[in-house]
Image (cartoon, rainbow, N blue to C red):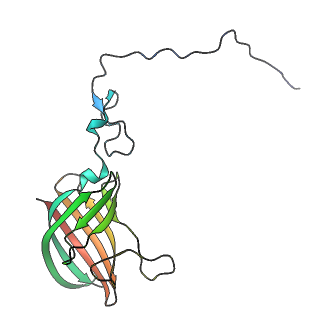
Amino acid sequence: MIAWGSLLSCNKWKDKKAVNDPRLTNPYCNDPNAVNYNVGFPGKPDNTICIYPTDLFRGTYLVKDSIYKDDTLFIRADSFLMTIQALSQTKLSMTGFCPSGSSLSMTAGISYIATIDTNVGDTTTRSIGQTFCRIQDTITGTLTRDLVDTTKLRINFQVVSDTGVTSYLGHAMKQ
């Protein structure tokens, strides 16, 4: 048995005009690219309070790291100043790791992690990453912003070179 039916309507549906609720005064970021997207919702959208991924990392840091060869042999501990500049809402430039002053490009995400961009190598290459201090070196890794201490970054870099694999593990404190 087949049932047939139809719906009839007299007038086309019209949305009611939005009501401006005076109780909703809390400003919130309404940009989905921001780290604090929708924090404070409901309220009034105010994108001037947005915090973008690069805002979590930019600044000058005192780096204290330990360097390991092939992830097991401790080589040395080191400390130096590192500077991170915002190039856009997600792109960063980091200097301080190489004595030559060359910079590393990174991409920051809303998850409080910045990753070194890959611009060297492909799926057929032994090591992919970004050229480091020498043309023979490629670096990969991340910076992670501490969720509790807003002045602290964790460093986890790996350098592949003609002499082997070197790991840079440490932390950086904002100056």
Name the residue nearer the viewer: 47 or 36: 47
Residue 101 position (above or below residue 172): below
Residue farthest to the right, as pictured: 1
Quarter containing the C terminus:
bottom left
Q: Is residue 1 above or below residue 162?
A: above
Q: Is residue 1 above or below residue 145?
A: above
Q: Who's the residue at 27% across and 63% down the image?
A: 93
Residue 165 occupies quadrant: bottom left
Asked where in the image residue 77 lies, by quadrant, the reply is bottom left
Quadrant where the N terminus is found in the figure: top right
Instruction: Provide residue 134's location: percent of width, then percent of height.
Output: 29, 83
Q: Position of residue 51 (x, y in %)?
A: 28, 44
**Residue at screen point 31% across, 22% down:** 24
**Image location (x, y in percent) of residue 162:** 34, 89
Where residue 74 appears, as percent x and y from the top left, is 20, 84
- Residue at x 28%, y 70% (from the top left corner): 156
Indicate left or right for 16 with 66 as reference: right
**Vertical arrangement, residue 22 with respect to residue 175, above or below:** above
Q: On the picture, is 113 further left or further right than 1?
A: left
